Image (cartoon, rainbow, N blue to C red):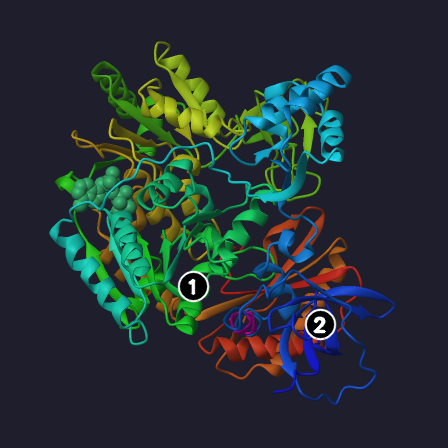
């Protein structure tokens, strides 16, 4: 068979086209589908990915490929197929999809393995030679004394450290031929200095056993298997099922991906996987955004070379280049952080389902609070539903009490941060030496600053939101664009000394708790207090070992953490999430309450949760209180049906933005008009409106919302319409398919 003569490539540039190049004879052996290559493009050269090999082409002016990057293809045929699907579904150019599929450090191919110099003895040195050396070059002799004692090669740095000698001496001895120096690659392992104690499979309870049985049946016949939705209350032992399912997957000679929301990808989580599969140091690779470029390079190659067989990671780990994929676990499948908020705007759970189907793998979605989408799929028999209704060891579900802040306000005259009931509950925990978590989904000290004289509020100059006052940092800051400003002493508008700080965030809760409970050890955990690399780990450790009585924090503490001695959780304000202008606000509130409540009572003593709210009768709060997911789902689905929102339809959101308000609006209106002509009646098109967040980072924003069931078709029509419509240079239109962020 002759070698194919042409390669079709996708260039790492937005040109929306695939191009053909000649494969030079001398590179033919090394180029395959999925190879990275350097090609001439316009006047320069560019990096590109080979997507197919051809015998002939009708393109003209064909130029040869210049070089191959790396020694083997980086993308499998299946991953290229997945990119094509994503491009069509998410209405996004394929080169943008490709950019997400390969980490930057792999695409650029500039960062390589970390090299280290290794010393090995070359020819033996005679005692006479050594004596002569001792007189003429005592330091070289000293080095040779150490070399003679070696049992094998040793890193040069280590040898020099032991002998306190320098590089010059090393090179001199090399010149004389007694040693050789070689460069060898070393892997940077982010967990190299941690010891993992091997853990064995636990004996499953009957619900877990039944669930695992279904997963194993699917693993035995993956081609017929449906995606599995594992709905298990917090603490029901879902992770143990993942671990045992992975075990079976490996036993079948296949590999596994575990997706975890970035925020839950804690050392604790990684440890659970690393220690269960610790027989080989390399079995588990970890991918997340805090890796250094070098670490990411090494973890990625460890997977690509087939040494790692399990990948634990955040969103983008769904693209991990594992061969022979057998299982994808998506933990906390309802988490909105699986949705990428920049192009390609993909949802990792949905991509996982599609990838699993393409590769003949099983997909296992786990959560205590399924998304409406996944649960609906289960009700429609598209997914297989498995339930874990009880906590492991029959721990009780926490008792949830609602505190009506309206009554509280009448009693106390001012809006206190802690209601009397919550205060009393904290007091009793402190007496019993049990721990408390206080949750508030908002950082900072006070969340707005206004003048009581002239009414002027301090808003961000770039965004339509108020600036937050941070007392520790003594600055005002915008949580959307990062703009900061000095704290004014007087109102900048009317120069009166009449500024009022209103609203509160975690920083003020911490101060308030410190004031009320001066003897308690209080610590705060949010993006402001966790700036050092180790602070997260240290604080969690201090909390786990009982050195902290009360932990105040944002969603950072809401997820997945397991503390047996926490018997009280206070949700300071449940209404924050509820009043967002977003059809998923109720769903998010239900999920948040359930998840946060799940932090309480995971040990011997049952937990108690206080939910403070001004809207005690809202369904999300009431159903969460009764741990009634099914009831919640029914009533929420009715609401979604009435409004024709997901899960019954898909939504596509176009955001048109520009620094120039008039041009943004005009473009939005033009786009909407063209869409109206292009879209058949089965699709619902809303008129363009200013976005709820009208201004962000200096850009004025308009929304066009579309809904429909046939999403591939809708995507295609939207793409075609936008492609035909040139926008002014300073106007941008972003398409978000299955949008989660509606602000
Ligand atoms: P979930 O992921 O559902 O919140 P986890 O898997 O974290 O729950 O389990 C909670 C705790 O129960 C963990 O400490 C886990 O080791 C333990 N556990 C899980 N299954 C069992 C079991 N069958 N027997 C004993 N302990 C278990
Ligand atoms: Zn701002």
Residue 72, compared with residue 597, is above or below; it is: below
Does mark 2 have its CB less than 8 Å from ligand 1? no
Residue at 44% x, 68% y is 355
Let me know if residue 452 appears in the view: no
What residue lies at 59% left-to-right and 33% top-to-bottom? 155
Farthest front residue in view: 128
Residue 446: x percent and y percent? Answer: 53, 27
Q: Which residues are magenta?
A: 80-84
Residue 112, given in percent of the width and then of the height, sits at 65, 48
Q: Nearer the viewer, residue 446 or 518?
A: 518
Q: Residue furthest right?
A: 43
Mark number, residue 27: 2
Vertical arrangement, residue 378 with respect to residue 695, above or below: below
Say what secondary structure mark 1 lies in: helix
Residue 352, disc: 1
The residue at 59%/41% (across/down) is: 292
Q: Characterize the local packing of mark 2: few (<14), some (14-19) or many (20 or more) Cα atoms within 10 angstroms.
A: few
82 part of magenta stretch: yes
Residue 71, percent from left and from top: 63, 62
Disc 2/disc 1 C-alpha distance (Å) = 34 Å
**Is there any visible trace of residue 470 in the rendered image?**
yes
Count every numbered label the image shows and give the total. 2
In the image, 557: left or right of 128?
left
Counting residues from the start of the chain, the first of labels 2 and 1 encountered is: 2
Q: Is 74 on the left or on the right of 205, as rendered?
A: right
CA neighbours of label 1 inside 10 A, class few (<14), some (14 to 19), many (20+): many
Q: Name the one closer to the observer, 207 or 371.
A: 207
For the N terminus, the quadrant is bottom right
């Amino acid at each position: 068979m002759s070698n194919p003569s042409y390669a079709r490539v996708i260039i790492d540039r937005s040109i929306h086209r695939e191009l053909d190049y000649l494969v030079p004879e001398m590179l033919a052996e090394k180029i395959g589908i999925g190879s990275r290559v350097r090609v001439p493009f316009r006047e320069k050269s560019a990096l590109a990915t080979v997507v197919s090999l051809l015998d002939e082409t009708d393109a003209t002016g064909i130029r040869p490929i210049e070089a191959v990057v790396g020694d083997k293809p980086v993308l499998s045929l299946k991953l290229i197929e997945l990119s094509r699907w994503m491009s069509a579904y998410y209405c996004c150019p394929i080169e943008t999809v490709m950019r997400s599929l390969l980490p930057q450090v792999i695409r650029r191919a500039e960062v390589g393995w970390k090299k280290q110099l290794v010393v090995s003895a070359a020819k033996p040195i005679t005692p006479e030679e050594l004596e002569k050396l001792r007189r003429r070059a005592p330091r070289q002799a000293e080095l040779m004394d150490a070399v003679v004692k070696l049992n094998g090669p040793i890193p040069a740095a280590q040898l020099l450290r032991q002998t306190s000698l320098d590089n010059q001496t090393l090179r001199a001895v090399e010149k004389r031929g007694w040693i050789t120096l070689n460069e060898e690659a070393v892997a940077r392992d982010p967990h190299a200095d941690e010891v993992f104690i091997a853990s064995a499979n636990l004996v499953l309870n009957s619900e877990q056993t039944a669930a695992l049985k279904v997963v194993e049946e699917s693993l035995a016949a993956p081609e017929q298997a449906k995606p599995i939705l594992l709905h298990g209350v917090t603490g029901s032992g879902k992770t143990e099922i993942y671990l045992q399912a992975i075990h079976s997957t490996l036993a079948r000679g296949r590999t596994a991906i575990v997706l975890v929301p970035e925020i839950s990808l804690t050392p604790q989580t990684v440890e659970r996987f690393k220690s269960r599969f610790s027989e080989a140091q390399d079995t588990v690779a970890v991918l997340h955004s805090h890796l250094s470029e070098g670490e990411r390079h090494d973890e990625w190659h460890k997977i690509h070379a087939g040494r790692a067989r399990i990948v634990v990671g955040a969103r983008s780990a769904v693209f991990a280049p594992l061969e022979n994929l057998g299982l994808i676990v998506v933990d906390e499948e309802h988490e909105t952080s699986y949705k990428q908020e920049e192009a390609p705007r993909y949802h990792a759970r949905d991509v996982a389902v599609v990838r699993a189907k393409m590769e003949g793998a099983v997909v296992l979605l786990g959560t205590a609070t399924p998304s409406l989408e996944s649960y609906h799929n289960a009700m429609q028999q598209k997914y297989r539903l498995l339930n874990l209704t009880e906590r492991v060891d029959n721990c009780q579900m926490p008792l949830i009490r609602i505190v009506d802040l309206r009554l509280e306000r009448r009693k106390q005259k001012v809006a206190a941060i802690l209601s009397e009931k919550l205060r009393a509950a904290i007091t009793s925990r402190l007496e019993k030496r049990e721990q408390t978590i206080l949750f508030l989904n908002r950082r900072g000290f006070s969340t707005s600053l206004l003048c009581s004289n002239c009414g002027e509020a301090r808003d961000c100059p770039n965004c339509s939101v108020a600036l937050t006052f941070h007392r520790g940092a003594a600055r005002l800051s915008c949580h959307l664009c990062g703009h900061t400003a000095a704290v004014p002493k007087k109102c900048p508008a009317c120069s009166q000394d009449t500024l009022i700080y209103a609203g509160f965030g975690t920083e003020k809760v911490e101060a308030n708790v410190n004031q009320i409970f001066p003897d308690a050890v209080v610590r705060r955990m949010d993006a402001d207090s966790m700036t050092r690399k180790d602070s997260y780990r240290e604080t969690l450790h201090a909390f786990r070992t009982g050195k902290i009585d009360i932990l105040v924090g944002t969603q950072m503490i809401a997820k997945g953490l397991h503390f047996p001695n926490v018997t009280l959780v206070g949700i300071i304000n449940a209404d924050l999430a509820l009043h967002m202008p977003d059809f998923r606000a109720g769903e998010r509130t239900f999920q948040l309450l359930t998840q946060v409540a799940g932090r309480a009572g995971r040990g011997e003593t049952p937990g108690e949760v206080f939910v403070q709210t001004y809207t005690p009768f809202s369904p999300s709060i009431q159903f969460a209180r009764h741990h009634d997911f099914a009831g919640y789902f029914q009533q929420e689905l009715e609401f979604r049906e009435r409004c024709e929102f997901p899960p019954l339809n898909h939504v596509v959101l176009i955001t048109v933005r520009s620094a120039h308000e008039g041009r943004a609006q005009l473009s939005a209106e033009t786009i909407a008009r063209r869409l109206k002509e292009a879209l058949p009646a089965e699709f619902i098109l809303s008129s363009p409106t200013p976005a709820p967040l009208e201004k962000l980072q200096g850009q004025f924003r308009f929304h066009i919302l579309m809904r429909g069931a046939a999403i591939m078709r809708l995507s295609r029509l939207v793409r075609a319409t936008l492609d035909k419509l040139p926008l002014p240079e300073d106007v941008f239109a972003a398409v978000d398919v299955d949008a989660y962020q509606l602000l």
